[in-house]
Each structure stands twice: as C-alpha cells, then as structure tokens.
Amino acid sequence: MNMYEVISRPIITEKAVGKKETENTLVFEVNPAATKTQVKEAVQKLFNVKVEEVRTAMFDGKLRRRGRFAGYRPAWKKAYVKLKAGQKMPEFVEI
C-alpha cells in the first residue's frame, strides 16, 4: 500500500479544526487496513513533518433506508495524528 492509498482525505469539521489549533493534531480518514505505522510514514512523507503519535478509531457502517430499501454505509477508519512540538501545521483547502 503506497502513501496515497493510506490517507483518503483530511477531515475538516469544527471539532477537527479545534484539535488542530489547540492540540497540534491532524485528523484524517484512512484506509481501514492501514496500520498506525503506515499512517505515520505517509503523513511524514506527504507533509514533511515529524509525527509524535497516531491514534486510530474504527467506525462501523450505519443502516440507511430509502423507503422499503435498506443498505449499509461502508465502515471507515479515522486517524488522529499528533505532530511534534515546533512542527509547521499544514493548511488544508476545503473543496
């Protein structure tokens, strides 16, 4: 798995922006099969920063209904990446 397959997208929500400003932490949606080590290496290579720690959380897909038809959203994984002190925080542009 290369670094572009590990990180799917940055998560830009009010909570994630708050973590970025106060705790020096970036939040990403990552491949569910990716390990913490792979996430750490991908962020270090893509953004040229030093990573202190990585925490991950798995989210199960929810049941969604449209009338009589039902299906599940896909399961996904979130990674909280804390940068070392003194590292420059990358800026994201919301599309």
Image (cartoon, grey):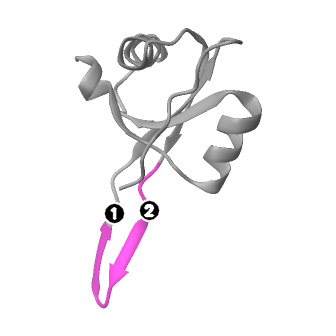
Residue at 66% x, 11% y: name it.
84
Amino acid, disc 2: Lys
In the rendered image, the vertical position of residue 7 relative to residue 69, given as above or below: above
Q: Is 59 contained in the magenta span?
A: no
Where is residue 33, by image quadrant? top left
Question: Which residue in the protein does label 1 denote?
Answer: 72
Question: Which residue in the protein does label 2 denote?
Answer: 62
Going by the image, does 40 lie left or right of 89?
left
In the rendered image, the vertical position of residue 40 relative to residue 20, given as above or below: above
Q: Depth check: give the residue in front, 64 or 7.
A: 7
Residue at 70% x, 37% y: name it.
21
Query: Residue lying farthest right?
Result: 22
Residue 73 rendering spot, x and y as whole percentages: 35, 60
Q: What stretch is highlighted in magenta?
A: 60-71
Quadrant of the snapshot with the C terminus:
bottom left
As drawn, the label of residue 11 is none
Instruction: Bin the neighbour count of mark 2 within 10 Å (Cα to Cα): few under 14, some 14-19, many 20 and up.
Output: few
Residue 4 rendering spot, x and y as whole percentages: 25, 25
In the rendered image, the vertical position of residue 17 relative to residue 65, given as above or below: above
Residue at 62% x, 14% y: name it.
87
Residue 41 rendering spot, x and y as whole percentages: 41, 10
Say if mark 1 contacts mark 2, CB within 8 Å.
yes
Residue 88 rendering spot, x and y as whole percentages: 58, 20
Where is residue 47, by image quadrant? top left
Q: How far apart are marks 1 and 2 (CA)?
A: 5 Å
Say what secondary structure mark 1 lies in.
strand
Q: Depth check: give the residue in front, 62 or 1.
A: 1
